[in-house]
Image (tube, rainbow, N blue to C red):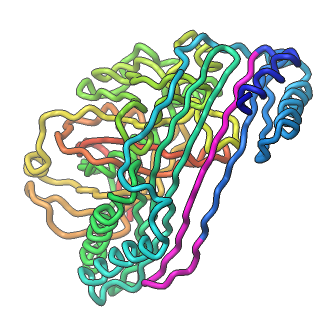
Amino acid sequence: MEIGEYALKIAEKMGVEHVEVRYQRLERTALKLRDGDVEAVVEGIDEGIGVRVLYRGCWGFSYTSSLTEEAVKEAVKRAIENAEIQGGKCEVKIAEANLARGQFKFQYQIDPRNIDVSEKISVLNRGIENAKEIAGDKLKSVEINYFDLWFKTHVMSSDGADATQVGARFYFAFRVYGKAPTGLFYDSERCGVMAGIEKLESTVIDVSTRMAKRVVSQYEAKTPPAGIVQAILESRAAGDFFHEIGHSFEADSVIRGVSAFEGLKGRTIASEILTVYEDPTIPNAWGSSFFDDEGVKTRKTVLIENGVLKGYIHSRESAKILGEKPTGHARAESYQYEPIIRMGNLVVEPKDWREEELIEDTKTGIYISGARGGQTTGKGPFQFQASEAYLIEKGEISKPLKSVSVSMRILEALKNIDAICREANYYTTLCGKGGQRMAVTALAPTMRIRRVVIGG
């Protein structure tokens, strides 16, 4: 008997109302480089099973990295005990769902497990050298934190989920420390790709080129004007913005009363030109999955349509509470964690403007390219630090600006979007929530927001 099926049978014999078993194997390489020197190399395999049970109305969870029948049986017992500790006061119910069955595979050409670490280091160093060639003596230091991962996940549930997905991905944070007349400055960009190593070099060169050009532009950057201005958010900055407000679409934040969109379903919350959806089914996107960690098939979910709030993203439990359907967004970092509601690929629908036309149409304002450190309290303001920004004067990009901070209230900003472009890029990150980091993406076009607060 397959070990996951064994866990299901044991749990059902112990009288649980529902059980999910999640087997996972993760094979990873992690590297840290600074200015061409290797500071850390870690390789490893992590394998195990997570068991979540619904027992007497409460969730209980446990996991084991031992795949013996004895260890798995003990994990099931611990999960039940963890549910019992809550004293039957939870009254959890789950919605019926479209459950996944079968085997699924993300597309990749070169398996990262088949490439020697020295070859990966060489590729990353070419990115560092590329940045140095472009930025010259204005670049003080470059740091890359990198990992690649081959993964296999098998989810089974007592009500019929039985699906496996296999894939490969890599991720890196590219950090630069640049020189300026006023002192050193720091910038970074994170990049995740659901693919094999065949895409590593082109991605590293692309990011390193962009970062080096920022170092050059920031050398002569001026202090920005403070106050309320109209701003053009280049697609990656727009992606950061929508990723952060995307947490308000997560149904658990709605249920807890911390979502900016609580109680607004069916109402106009944004400009009528804005349509937003969540779609983990995009082939090989960074935040994609064939099914979530409850075994529910993923699907496209419209969140805002022509400015009207249409819904939220759900687990089976939250869907039951709010009377909606599960969307396949219960995700976990690994078999060691319980699934929680997480975004996958948040997409802003493109419109007809070209970026150069939008800049020409904007007589005065700020052009913001790239962002870091986005934060929101849910119902409060959204804030981030621009990676790169420029003054717009008479419909043209002029002098670079330094240390530009941006602030706006979410609902006001959504209603103040008055132009959306055709051009879009992926903003990718590992997003933290509930002690877990998950691969998430925002695909947003360049756009203009009429009123934002700028500071330096």
Measuring from the top left, give residue 51's x and y in whole percent: 75, 32
Res. 335 in view: yes
- Residue 20 colored magenta? yes
Res. 260 in view: no
In the rendered view, would you say 302 is above or below 423?
above
Q: Is residue 52 left or right of residue 39?
A: right
Q: Residue at x 24, y 80 (%)?
A: 134
In the rendered view, would you say 68 is above or below 200?
above
> Which residues lie in the magenta part?
18-41
Taking the view exactly as shown, the residue that stands out farthest to the front is 1
Q: Residue at x 43, y 70 (%)?
A: 120
Q: Residue at x 48, y 85 (%)?
A: 37
Q: In front: 211, or 331? A: 331
Q: Residue at x 16, y 58 (%)?
A: 392
Q: In front: 372, or 160? A: 160
Q: In front: 120, or 203? A: 120
Measuring from the top left, give residue 431's x and y in whole percent: 53, 48
Q: The C terminus appears in which quarter of the rendering?
A: bottom left
In the rendered view, would you say 169 is above or below 114?
above
Measuring from the top left, give residue 289's x and y in whole percent: 47, 35
Measuring from the top left, give residue 363's x and y in whole percent: 11, 51
Q: In front: 88, or 31? A: 31
- Residue 90 colored magenta? no
Q: Is residue 236 left or right of residue 84?
A: left
Within the image, what quadrant is residue 42 found in?
Answer: bottom right
Q: What predominant SS class does the magenta segment belong to?
A: strand
Q: The N terminus appears in which quarter of the rendering?
A: top right
